[in-house]
Amino acid sequence: MKKNIAILKAYINEDKLLLETNEPILELVPGEQILVDSAQYSFIYLMEDKNDYTYIVLHEQIWPLLKNAQERKLPVWITFNDEQKELINFHDEFDYILTNIKGNSNYGKELVTKVECIFLT
């Protein structure tokens, strides 16, 4: 069964974007892929463990920080207590997703509008 991990807090520290969660991440391996959840207005970074995928859910509330990190090409890390993992290939995947969303009604008009307002201005 796929597991969703929500981000509780996001902030930029020491030239990287840190995404804090309340779930252990030690066993997770970056999947190097980003999906879009049009219904929930979120991006999903895929991570894997030995059994299945885990979705790191990047809700609309942290999009301004994602934009800042994207513009500055800051590495993106997920953290839980003392555990930290870099979300490898984040910017390449994110650029690709943003390019696909621009003007693409397949994602839903509202999501496209939100993404264009924040990331493509």
Image (spheres, helix red, strand yellow):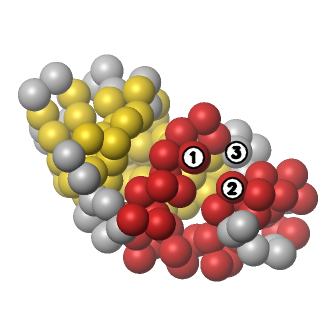
The answer to which of 90 and 34 lies nearer the viewer is: 90
Q: Looking at this rendering, what residue extends furthest in the left direction?
A: 82
Q: Reply above or below: 19 against 109.
A: above
Q: Which of the two marks, 3 or 1, is nearer to us in this view?
A: 1
Asked whether the beta carbons under mark 2 and mark 1 sit within 8 Å of each other, the answer is: yes
To which residue does mark 3 refer? 41
Q: Which of the two marks, 2 or 3, is nearer to us in this view?
A: 2
Callout 1 crowding tier (Cα within 10 Å): few <14, some 14–19, many ≥20? few
What residue do we see at 64% from left, 78% from top? 99
Tag of residue 89: none
Tag of residue 64: 1
Q: Position of residue 37 (x, y in %)?
A: 65, 50
Q: Secondary structure at mark 1?
A: helix
Asked whether the beta carbons under mark 3 and mark 1 sit within 8 Å of each other, the answer is: no
Which amino acid is tagged 3? Tyr
- The Cα atoms of the two marked residues, 3 and 1, are separated by 14 Å
Q: Earlier in the sequence, mark 2 or mark 1?
A: 1
Tag of residue 118: 2
What residue do we see at 23% from left, 35% from top? 79
